[in-house]
Image (tube, rainbow, N blue to C red):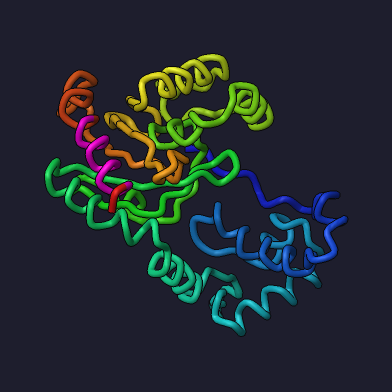
């Protein structure tokens, strides 16, 4: 499976010209971002390498985050992992976000009707981030957790999130960060991916098959506000053996459209 590149090691020139931009805060956030690709814990040298910070600076940031509860240190190994306060921040966001509160009851109802995993995601640069993930019985723990960031081109929700962008912007993004395969069937050719986004834009929905996980299909539509502006994507994932493309289109896509309309008018 692909991973995100390490955090940027230097403040951009645009940020350097911003008098309100706090460069030291950005450096400190790199330390937390470094754990995005970590399967377990990180040592001081690991963090310094991933962030591009010197060991002395990295150590000061690490110590500060540890004192605040955002990092936890293992006394025996002297390695660090994220602390519970990171989860608390996510809770504060999800609890107070109006879109999440409006959408959640409708997404729960959709999950209960179809018995499949239901998600809501938003665009973050060239990636998508899951805000809500309502699991089916077949999902693994990693597939249940909100907050996961993935390339937008790789699944149905992300492709729908790309549809409001013009073709040149999408093409340039794909060229800047060339797609890499999650499965043997993942589409990674930029021209083919652009064609799939165009098709989703025309159809108003996106379907995917075996793009991130083997034997998994997905369907997604855009969630818009009252003015028609895109807010998020809502999607359903299902086992391919149970939901071939024709059944996904017949049984799931209409339910996604009805759910999006219900949320829009909530």
Residue 24 pos. (x, y %): 78, 69
Q: Does residue 114 lie above or below 40 as drawn?
A: above
- Residue 257 on the magenta segment: yes
The residue at 39%/56% (across/down) is 99
Q: Is residue 89 left or right of residue 131?
A: right
Q: Is residue 149 left or right of residue 235?
A: right
Q: Does residue 196 lie above or below 19 as drawn?
A: above
Residue 31 pos. (x, y %): 66, 64
State which region is magenta: 254-264
The residue at 40%/37% (across/down) is 157
- Residue 266 on the magenta segment: no
Residue sitting at the far bottom: 67
Residue 108 pos. (x, y %): 21, 53
Viewer-proximal residue among 259 and 154 = 259
| Quarter the C terminus occupies | bottom left
The residue at 17%/23% (across/down) is 250
Viewer-proximal residue among 83 and 10 = 10
């Amino acid at each position: 499976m692909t991973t995100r590149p390490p955090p940027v090691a230097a403040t951009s020139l645009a940020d350097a010209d911003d008098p309100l931009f706090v460069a030291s805060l950005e450096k400190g956030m790199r330390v937390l971002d470094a754990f995005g690709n970590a399967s377990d814990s990180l040592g001081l040298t690991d963090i310094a390498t991933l962030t591009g910070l010197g060991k002395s600076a990295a150590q000061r940031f690490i110590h500060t985050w540890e004192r605040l509860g955002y990092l936890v240190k293992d006394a025996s190994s002297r390695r660090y992992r994220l602390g519970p306060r990171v989860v608390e921040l996510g809770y504060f966001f999800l609890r107070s976000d109006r879109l999440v509160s409006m959408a959640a009851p409708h997404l729960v109802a959709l999950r209960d009707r179809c018995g499949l995993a239901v998600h809501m995601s938003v665009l973050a640069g060239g990636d998508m981030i899951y805000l809500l993930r309502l699991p089916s019985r077949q999902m693994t723990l990693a597939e249940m957790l909100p907050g996961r960031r993935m390339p937008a081109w790789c699944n149905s929700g992300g492709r729908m999130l790309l549809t409001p962008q013009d073709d040149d912007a999408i093409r340039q993004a794909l060229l800047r960060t060339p797609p890499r395969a999650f499965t043997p069937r993942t589409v990674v050719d930029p021209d083919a991916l652009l064609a799939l986004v165009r098709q989703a834009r025309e159809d108003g929905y996106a379907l995917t098959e075996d793009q991130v996980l083997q034997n998994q299909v997905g369907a997604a539509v855009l969630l818009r506000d009252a003015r028609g502006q895109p807010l998020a994507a809502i999607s359903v994932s299902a086992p391919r053996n149970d939901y071939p493309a024709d059944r996904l289109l017949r049984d799931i896509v209409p339910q996604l459209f009805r759910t999006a309309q219900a949320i829009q008018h909530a």
